[in-house]
Image: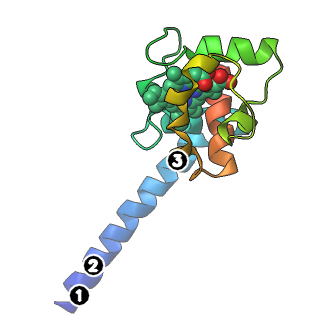
Amino acid sequence: MKKIIALLGIAVLSISCGKKEKTVSATANVSPEELLVIEGKALFESNRAACASCHKPNQKIIGPSIKEIVKVYEEQNGDMIAFLKKKAKPIVDPEQYSVMETNFAILKTMTDRELESLVAYMYSEK
Ligand code: HEC
């Protein structure tokens, strides 16, 4: 019995090791910038952040499109990280700000890296 358990243990170990290698090799030729964009896209579209339920790349739904947001930020040299940290005023559609404001509860739980990844993803869609 002990032998079987030990064997099972080795099998599980090698399966999980195999998985790890796959992840590493899949991301090995991705630059740090690209990795940030990939992370940001996943987070943007996740249930946790839910940004994608109101923001689509090219089309206004509940919120302005990602393209529109980035365009305004580039034109006005805005600081999107500061906005997401609630340290800067809205510059895209201030009249609708109360709708966006509900998201700060979630944004407050995010690390700097996560906020940076969201911004990197949004700029990649411009
Ligand atoms: C319930 C719908 C909704 C969700 C979910 C949502 N937004 Fe928004 N967002 C809006 C609306 C509406 C606006 C336009 C008002 C404004 O400009 O503040 C907006 C505006 C913005 C702006 C531009 C702010 C500015 O300067 O005017 C950014 C950046 C943004 N959202 C990012 C995000 C991110 C990142 C998430 C996910 C964490 C998210 N939004 C989730 C509705 C939403």
**Mark 2 touches mark 1? (CB < 8 Å):** yes
Question: Is tag 1's residue or tag 3's residue first in the polypeptide sequence?
Answer: 1
User: Residue drawn at (27%, 78%), measured in percent from left and top?
Assistant: 7
Residue 67 is left or right of residue 50, and the answer is: right
> Horizontal and vertical percent for residue 40?
58, 36
For numbered disc 3, what is the local secondary structure? helix
Q: How many other residues sit within 10 Å of disc 2, few (<14), some (14-19) or many (≥20)?
A: few
User: Residue drawn at (68%, 25%), measured in percent from left and top?
Assistant: 90
Cα distance between the residues tagged 2 and 1: 6 Å
Instruction: Say whether residue 12 is visible.
Output: yes
> Horizontal and vertical percent for residue 119?
67, 31
Cα distance between the residues tagged 3 and 2: 47 Å
Q: Residue furthest top?
A: 59
Residue where numbered disc 3 is placed = 105
Question: Is tag 3's residue or tag 2's residue first in the polypeptide sequence?
Answer: 2
For numbered disc 1, what is the local secondary structure? helix
**Mark 1 touches mark 3? (CB < 8 Å):** no
Residue where numbered disc 1 is placed = 3
The answer to whether residue 105 is above or below residue 73 is below
Front-most of residues 114 and 87 = 87
The answer to whether residue 9 is above or below residue 45 is below
Task: State the count of labels.
Answer: 3
Question: Residue 18's quadrant in the figure?
Answer: bottom left
Looking at the rendering, in which quadrant would you find the N terminus? Answer: bottom left
| Residue type indicated by callout 3 | Ala
Marking on residue 7: 2
